[in-house]
Image: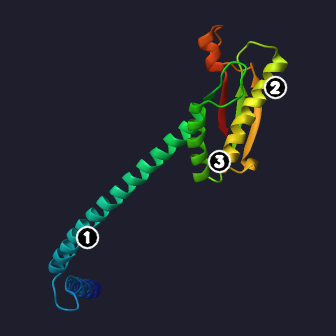
Amino acid sequence: MKDQRLGLYVGLVLVIVSLIFMVSCAKHRDVSETAGGESREAVEKAGEKAGEAGEAGEAAISEEELAARKKAEARQAKEKAAKEKFVNENVYFGFDDASLTRKARRILSDKAEWLRDHPEQEVVIEGHCDERGTKEYNMALGQRRAESIKNYLVNAGIDSSRIDTISYGEERPVDPRHNEMAWAKNRRGEFRLK
């Protein structure tokens, strides 16, 4: 009797497992077909074609984006170069003189244009001298040089509140040698952005 029950249980388990297997296969078959009766394979092929078309569109967009990025990078590089030129191009003065030369006015004209294009930018003008003369005299001369530059920029339309001046006199030479070439380099106005 026990053997019959055991056989019945085993048979019942086999029937249940068979039913589960058949239901599972039926679901798998349903999933492999779409609502329109198309096979999964056909749907995958259509998806691949759409993906290829999308990639071609992305490639075209990428080329446009790349061109735009290159233009933006070129614009940034040009802007950076103009800013560096503004800061690094000094104005030079004659011995014991605070008047602007023709070359200095040309340089300042370019600087005024750059400042007009960048209304948010403020600048400090530093006046420098060579080592000849007393420290006090050179501090005053450096200030006159810085003020001479500021006056030019203000007359060119730059708001004076955007421009500060300072004199370093002979304290910060570019060239520490004691000859005319060095002194000519040290008689200058420098520009520092705030």
Q: Position of residue 164 (x, y in %)?
A: 75, 41
Q: Which of the pair 137/155 is nearer the observer?
A: 155
Q: Amino acid at mark 2?
A: Ala
Q: Are marks 3 and 1 in contact (CB under 8 Å)?
A: no
According to the picture, the residue beneath numbered tag 2 turns out to be 140
Q: Amino acid at mark 3?
A: Ala
Farthest bottom residue? 36
Q: Residue at x 84, y 19 (%)?
A: 136
Image-based side of 72 in relation to 149, left or right: left
According to the picture, the residue beneath numbered tag 3 turns out to be 156
Q: Residue at x 72, y 35 (%)?
A: 148
Q: Position of residue 139 (x, y in %)?
A: 80, 23
> For numbered disc 1, what is the local secondary structure?
helix
Q: Is residue 82 visible?
A: yes
- Quick check: 36 above or below 21? below
The colour style of the image is rainbow
Q: Amino acid at mark 1?
A: Gly
